[in-house]
Amino acid sequence: EAGVTQSPTHLIKTRGQQATLRCSPISGHTSVYWYQQALGLGLQFLLWYDEGEERNRGNFPPRFSGRQFPNYSSELNVNALELEDSALYLCASSLVGGIGNQPQHFGDGTRLSIL
Amino acid sequence: QKEVEQDPGPLSVPEGAIVSLNCTYSNSAFQYFMWYRQYSRKGPELLMYTYSSGNKEDGRFTAQVDKSSKYISLFIRDSQPSDSATYLCAMRFPGSGTYKYIFGTGTRLKVLA
């Protein structure tokens, strides 16, 4: 079974630019979650998508946005990039979001570096 | 106060030692508890997933939950250099329609050959 896949592996941008990160969940998983993992700060929840809808978002500004496609893959967009956006962005998927006892499975992340 | 507290380490042990990793939490509503292992430059890998208080064993790993003390532990027996990684605890609320997974900041473990 293929795991969660993310692309690109690395992304280098400059301040003010826009970044798009992509995620394909495990086959059969309908929920996708995005996290930011900055150095020394642990995983910070960004967004949760389930069945194509945004279900919840963390304490991040509106320039962090995303969407989920009919095939359950997802995209995270970050506009007006700032230096502090440099981090590892992790995508996770689960069978059904927020219901029952389904744990999340993670991809290996996209490392976003802002110059 | 953080909802989940985890000692960042690093924790260094000799090969073969028993390792104990711990997290404390403040919200008694948490009902599901997870341990993830994260190698450098990789995403977190789910190791253990528990619901109730008590112990759950899987090979060399044992997860322990004490809801009365709001304390969870991961024990690694016969530790190997390949166990060197960062270990993240995570927990979530029950119920539908509401997301809340909270992660600890992780404990760095080094197992010395």
Image: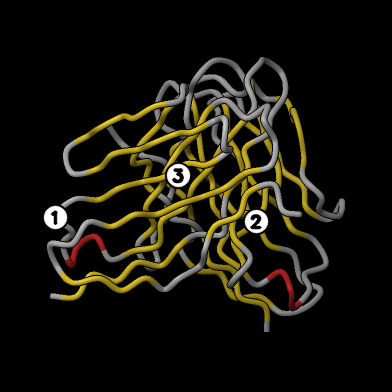
Respond whether the residues carrying marks 3 and 2 are from the same subunit: yes
Residue named by callout 2: A20
Residue type at the position of mark 2: Thr
Name the residue located 56 percent from the left edge and 69 percent from the top edge. A11
Mark 2 or 1: in front is 1
Residue type at the position of mark 1: Asp
Q: Secondary structure under badge 1?
A: loop
- Colour mode of the rendering: secondary structure
Chain for mark 1?
B
Position above or below: A36 against A17? above
Observer-nearest of A85 and A10: A85
Mark 3 burial class by Cα count in 10 Å: few <14, some 14-19, many 20+? many
Which residue occupies the extreme right position in the image? A62
In percent of width and height, residue B26 lies at 68, 42
**What whole-number distance in Å separates the C-alpha atoms at marks 2 and 1?**
43 Å
Chain for mark 3?
A
Horizontal arrangement in the rendering, residue B36 relative to residue A79 (left or right): left
Residue named by callout 3: A106
Horizontal arrangement in the rendering, residue A42 relative to residue B18 (left or right): right
Which residue occupies the extreme bottom position in the image? A115
Name the residue located 77 percent from the left edge and 45 percent from the top edge. A58
Residue named by callout 1: B78
Residue type at the position of mark 3: Phe
Observer-nearest of A112 and B76: B76
Q: How many marks?
A: 3
Name the residue located 49 percent from the left edge and 33 percent from the top edge. B66
Position above or below: A22 against B56? below
In percent of width and height, residue A63 lies at 84, 56
Which residue occupies the extreme front position in the image? B69
In percent of width and height, residue B56 lies at 31, 29
